[in-house]
Image: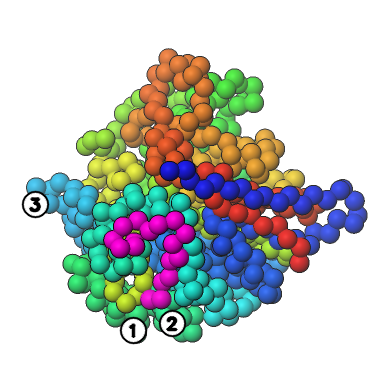
Amino acid sequence: MKLISIIFTVFVLFATSSNAKEGSYHGIATAHPIASEVGNEILKNGGNAFDAAVAVSAALAVVEPYASGIGGGGFWLLHRKKDNTTVMIDGREKAPLKAHRNMYLDNKGNFNKKLAIKGALAGGIPGVPAALDHITRKYGRLSLSANLAPAIRLAKDGYQIDDKYRLYAKLRLDSLREDPDTARIFLHNNNVPPEKHVLKQPDLASTLELLATQGAKGFYSGNTAQLLVNGINKGAGIWTLKDLEQYKVVEREPISFTYRGMKISSASPPSSGGIALAEILGMLEKFDLDKMDNIRRKHIIIEAMKRAYADRAQFLGDPDFTSIPVKQLMGDKHISRQAGEIRNNEATPSEFISTYAKPDGNGNDTTHFSIIDHEGNMVSATLSINFPFGACFVPAGTGVLLNNEMDDFAAKPGTPNAYGLIGGEANAIAPGKRPLSSMSPTLITSDNATAVLGTPGGSRIITMVLLAILDFSNGVSAADIVSHRRFHHQYLPDVVMYEDNALTDKEVAALSLLGHRLKRKMSPYGGGQGSYGNMQIVVQHRDGSISAASDPRGHGMTLILSR
């Protein structure tokens, strides 16, 4: 099956002159054309970037049910131009109050993967509805009803699914069939819907309407909350009304640091993105990458990735539950020691980097959007329900597709999750705790431009954003940044994964001689075998002009329009 792949990128370029007026244009890049149009609609109707972010988040919940939804969570990195404030809205899911560290282990202490990825027990308490209400009230101009109106319309009237939807439905067909309500909504006659099928979600529209008119309480209490709890418990889950009533979003200070004179702001814990990026780029700044050949340069980058992911496994988790040594991890002493251990002519085996945890054995199911409005306000947001179609479970009467983010916890220390990531006590399951995430919405500011970017991709998100930052620092265009082929290392398994054409045969041979184990990534997600990611980027240049691009691996769309 051939996936739809669309890049619709408009570049608005001003000549350098006194007539170039900053603020004349806004830019949007999302993973779905309908969501981009919704964001533009809100901006045209007087909303700001934060209103548009709420509308886009809700629209994506309707048209990309395999990637995100109001049954999931996310991080919204907001930059308000008028007071130069940058904040991260943490709408990450939380473990139910009845959750416990051994809930996915069998009577022999072995991890039961199926319980953590499928069905009512796999879902954390959603954060998206609370975040949409919070962002609208504190940062937006329009009402929540106005911001959610396009998504409600799409859920009621329906939209025509695309090949990407059909691919993901095929991938999880057996799981989607297991829950009757899920199958009724997302399948057609219990099979993958045919081409041009119009997907209508009336229950979701009703849930969104209550959220729109009552705010967060319309989701976390009352009829919707009762339906959610009833459905979850019927499916052998453990949610309670208290879980929903107690959910709150948290405003957190982003992780901020510099690299080669650029200021970078990214997600803070419970995301591992910002700290890992600061560590990797800090190590790389100790080397003169510009004077290296491609093979040596990639070797050094891979070694830096490996060391940051080792720290991720050992130290990172929910900051409300775990003491994270942020200053030490990002400090020059630690970074210099890490960089000093990188050998120019030899790969360091992961077991020698850290003996903290070893796996017992051996995603693109997320979404991202970037927005800059004509005032200079910016939003970089990454949202997820974890796997395609999440837990493949819908509590009856709600239309809410449940996430399976509980798999992002370390269900058993040292045992890899579905993305091969390991973790320990810092990310162990606990009631009310947020699982560690790799989602890394990011802002980069140089002397010449500011970029708003991010991507889905599970454990590979951080390294994709890293490679984009390196490209941006070298003046690479938005279109080329999202198009470049990618490689990745996450400490364990001790393997360099790479996309088709990311490494030449010569580079593979040379890196192998240095001691690296390499594996071409064969992924069914994000554009077919051998590719991953779906990056969205909007760049505002010093003269006020805007450029933007959507990843050709997906079917997103960018819009750059005048006021």
Q: CA distance from mark 1 to mark 3?
A: 37 Å
| Residue at 38% in and 67% down | 71
Q: Would residue 213 be counted in the magenta stretch?
A: no
Query: Is residue 463 visible to the viewer in this orientation of the structure?
Result: yes
Nearer-the-camera pick, 346 or 532: 532
Nearer-the-camera pick, 261 or 347: 347
Q: CA distance from mark 1 to mark 2?
A: 9 Å
Locate residue 322 relative to residue 555 in the image: left or right: left
Give the amino acid at mark 2.
Leu
Q: CA distance from mark 2 to mark 3?
A: 42 Å
Give the amino acid at mark 3.
Asn
Element on which disc 2 rests: helix
Q: Which mark is drawn over residue 210?
A: 2
Q: Which residues are magenta?
A: 187-203
Q: Position of residue 85 (x, y in %)?
A: 63, 63
Q: Quadrant of the N terminus?
A: top left
Question: Quick check: 337 above or below 3?
Answer: above
Q: Nearer the viewer, mark 1 or mark 3?
A: 1
The residue where tag 1 is placed is 223
Mark 1–mark 2 contact, CB under 8 Å? yes
Q: Position of residue 516 (x, y in %)?
A: 40, 22
Badge 2, how many Cα within 10 Å: few under 14, some, many 20+? some
The residue where tag 3 is placed is 107
Q: Quadrant of the C terminus?
A: bottom right
| Residue at 43% in and 48% down | 364
Element on which disc 3 rests: loop
Badge 1, how many Cα within 10 Å: few under 14, some, many 20+? some
Q: Would residue 196 be counted in the magenta stretch?
A: yes
Task: Give the prevailing secondary structure in the magenta stretch.
Answer: loop
Give the amino acid at mark 1.
Asn
